Image (cartoon, rainbow, N blue to C red):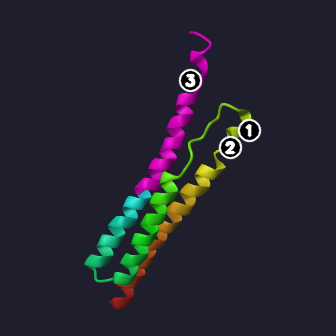
Amino acid sequence: MSMTALPDARRAPVDRTSLSWQRTAMHSALLALVAAVTAITLGEPAVAVVAVVLAGFAIVVGATTPRVKRSELADRDPWMLMLRTVVVLSATALVGVMLVVAVALEL
């Protein structure tokens, strides 16, 4: 094994981890879009509008999540990736709760 191949071999799992955070945000955006369609089907236009806005927010956050470059010791902190993911997942959970509450209040 050459010395030049070693950094690339170490970097591959880091890149995959970074991309997995991006995929999580995108999946959350897709879930918010499904919630918007469900809200429209159930006759909850206000929840649908909020769901579409939060889905757009999740798409922007997921698409702008930077890849982690951990070639330097100072760049190995994944905190921002985790924070972005928590924000997006929380927003999607809020849409789900809003949908349940809106439907429950109409019964």
Q: Residue furthest bottom?
A: 106
| Contact (Cβ within 8 Å) of mark 1 with mark 2 | yes
Earlier-in-chain disc, 3 versus 2: 3
Q: Position of residue 73 (x, y in %)?
A: 72, 34
Residue 5 or 85: which is nearer the viewer?
Answer: 5
Residue 75 or 13: which is nearer the viewer?
Answer: 75
For the residue labelled by badge 2, is the local secondary structure a helix, a strand or a loop?
A: loop
Q: Residue furthest left?
A: 41
Q: Which residues are magenta?
A: 1-27
Quadrant in the picture for the N terminus: top right
Q: Residue at x 47, y 61 (%)?
A: 58
Looking at the rendered structure, the kind of residue marked 3 is Asp
User: Which label sits on residue 74?
Assistant: 1
For the residue labelled by badge 1, is the local secondary structure a helix, a strand or a loop?
A: helix
Q: Position of residue 12 (x, y in %)?
A: 53, 29
Q: Residue at x 56, y 59 (%)?
A: 86
Identify the residue position indicated by label 2 in the image.
Answer: 77
Quadrant in the picture for the C terminus: bottom left
Q: Position of residue 61 (x, y in %)?
A: 52, 57
| Marks 3/1: CA–CA distance | 18 Å
Graded by Cα atoms within 10 Å as few (under 14), some (14 to 19) or many (20 or more), the crowding at tag 1 reads few
Residue 96 seen in the figure:
no
The main secondary structure of the magenta stretch is: helix
User: Which label sits on residue 40?
Assistant: none
Q: Residue at x 50, y 36 (%)?
A: 16
Would residue 21 be counted in the magenta stretch? yes
Q: Residue furthest right?
A: 74
User: Which label sits on residue 8?
Assistant: 3
**Residue 3 horizontal side relative to residue 30, left or right:** right
- In the displayed structure, 15 sits above or below 23; it is above
